[in-house]
Image: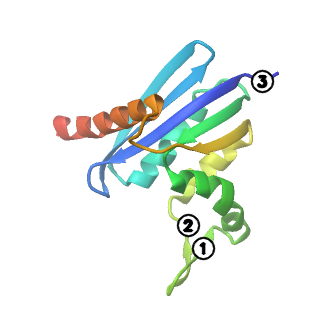
Amino acid sequence: MKKHIFLTTDGACIGNPGPGGWACILRYKEHYRELWGNDPATTNNRMELKAVIEGFRALKEGCSITVRTDSQYLRDGITKWIHNWKANSWLHKVKGEGKQPVKNRDLWEEIDRLVEQHEVTWVWVKGHATDSDNNRCDSLANDAAKDLLRSS
């Protein structure tokens, strides 16, 4: 039986684009681990994707994972949109502009590759509400982004 992991993720950006931060919390039974990092020139969406990537990378074996995110972009992208993106050579329709390359393709491809190793359930949680892990990730991601401003 695979380990069941709860992975809570969040991304932040000061300006968009601008300095960004990502964070995730991994929970397995009584074990708890926080990870975070930053990027000096990025977008909020890239940080949302980076958070889940780093959470998956921290796992040493295939697991059953419940990913908890306040990003509908992340949840809908991996559960709904990615199938058409791949079928259409990573292009999607943009109203009034025709087909355009999918933004953040590099990160979506990495998530798609990482997901294959696990059994994943994607759950949207309301951001800035009563979820303690989501609030902690928000704080860590924002602090990571602010660290870039303090160090420059």
Location of residue 102 (image quadrant): bottom right
What's under tag 1, amino acid-wise?
His
Compared across the picture, whether 107 is left or right of 78 comes to left
Q: Residues within 10 Å of mark 3 (few under 14, many from 20)?
A: few
Q: Nearer the viewer, mark 2 or mark 3?
A: 3
Q: Residue at x 56, y 38 (%)?
A: 68
Q: Earlier in the sequence, mark 2 or mark 3?
A: 3
Kindly tell me whether residue 149 is visible in this rendering. Answer: yes
Q: CA distance from mark 1 to mark 3?
A: 35 Å
Quadrant of the snapshot with the C terminus: top left
Q: Contact, CB < 8 Å: mark 1 with mark 2? A: yes
What's under tag 3, amino acid-wise?
Lys
Q: CA distance from mark 2 to mark 3?
A: 33 Å
- Residue identifier under label 3: 2
- Among all residues in the image, which is located at the extreme top? 30
Q: Contact, CB < 8 Å: mark 1 with mark 3? A: no
Compared across the picture, whether 64 is left or right of 8 comes to right
Kindly tell me whether residue 114 is visible in this rendering. Answer: no
- Residue identifier under label 2: 102
> For numbered disc 3, what is the local secondary structure?
loop
Compared across the picture, whether 137 is left or right of 60 comes to left
Q: Earlier in the sequence, mark 1 or mark 3?
A: 3
Location of residue 119 (image quadrant): top right
> For numbered disc 2, what is the local secondary structure?
loop
Give residue 100's position: percent from left, percent from top: 54, 76
Give residue 114's position: percent from left, percent from top: 66, 41
Res 92 label:
1
> For numbered disc 1, what is the local secondary structure?
strand
**Vertical order, 58 against 75 (above or below):** above
